[in-house]
Image (cartoon, grey):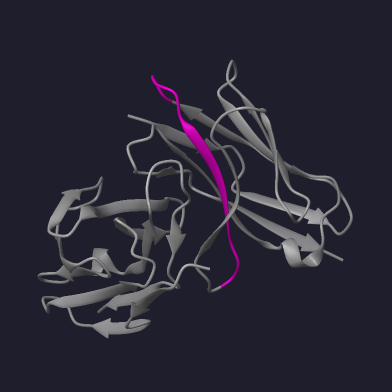
Amino acid sequence: AQSVTQLDSQVPVFEEAPVELRCNYSSSVSVYLFWYVQYPNQGLQLLLKYLSGSTLVESINGFEAEFNKSQTSFHLRKPSVHISDTAEYFCAVTPNDYKLSFGAGTTVTVRA
Amino acid sequence: DAGITQSPRHKVTETGTPVTLRCHQTENHRYMYWYRQDPGHGLRLIHYSYGVKDTDKGEVSDGYSVSRSKTEDFLLTLESATSSQTSVYFCASTPGQGNEQYFGPGTRLTVT
């Protein structure tokens, strides 16, 4: 079985400051890793994913995440956040059995 | 965006009544999922389907049943709703391994 731990439930941050959201997972087999974002009163949208290859993956809106196999982590970072990045962020893993295991989520609140 | 709709979007029902939530996708995706979202728990898988009439349980399946008679429709039924089933329910679909799951807008269910 897999499990996902998001180490911060709430992350307040000022506009244009950097942010890091931490995600650790446990699994006895290789996994695919995902970050999803949920804006208020909406469903989840994929932010980025790691399947294989380069351990650094990027999204189109400036987020990046690095897969670290030895530390079983997949932390999400953005060097400069905007008000519009206020949302809840979910880390998820799958051992390729078509089912995702989600972390509890991290709420990012960006303040001016 | 994958076309996934959920109905109803909001429902209030009384304890002991049956409730059916509907998920409809227009992408011909093979796999479909029902999750519930509760504060502090992230998303938890209730049931999933890997084809028409092929379904299996997730981690929180007690009190829920599902049916999939057509590729595009996946129904979630609460046979006798309880207050602990008050939650936001999300449907998702994916074409297969390594692909992201696409989420519907959610159904907010309140059991009084």
**Relative to B68, is B7 above or below?**
below
Q: Nearer the viewer, residue A96 or B112?
A: A96
Q: Nearer the viewer, residue B48 or B85?
A: B48
**Residue at the far top in the pictured view:** A70
Residue A30, magenta (yes or no)? yes
Would residue B82 be visible to someone looking at this image?
Answer: no
| Number of marks in the rendered image | 0
Q: Nearer the viewer, residue A52 or B87?
A: A52
Residue A68, magenta (yes or no)? no
Report the magenta residues as a range: A27-40
Q: Nearer the viewer, residue B23 or A10?
A: B23
Query: Which residue lies at the image location 72% right of the left edge and 60% below the top edge?
Result: A109
Residue A76 position by quadrant: top right
Residue A80 is situated, as x and y percent measured from the top left of the image, at 86, 51
Query: Which residue lies at the image location 29% right of the left edge and 56% below the top edge?
Result: B30
Which image quadrant: the C terminus of chain B? bottom left
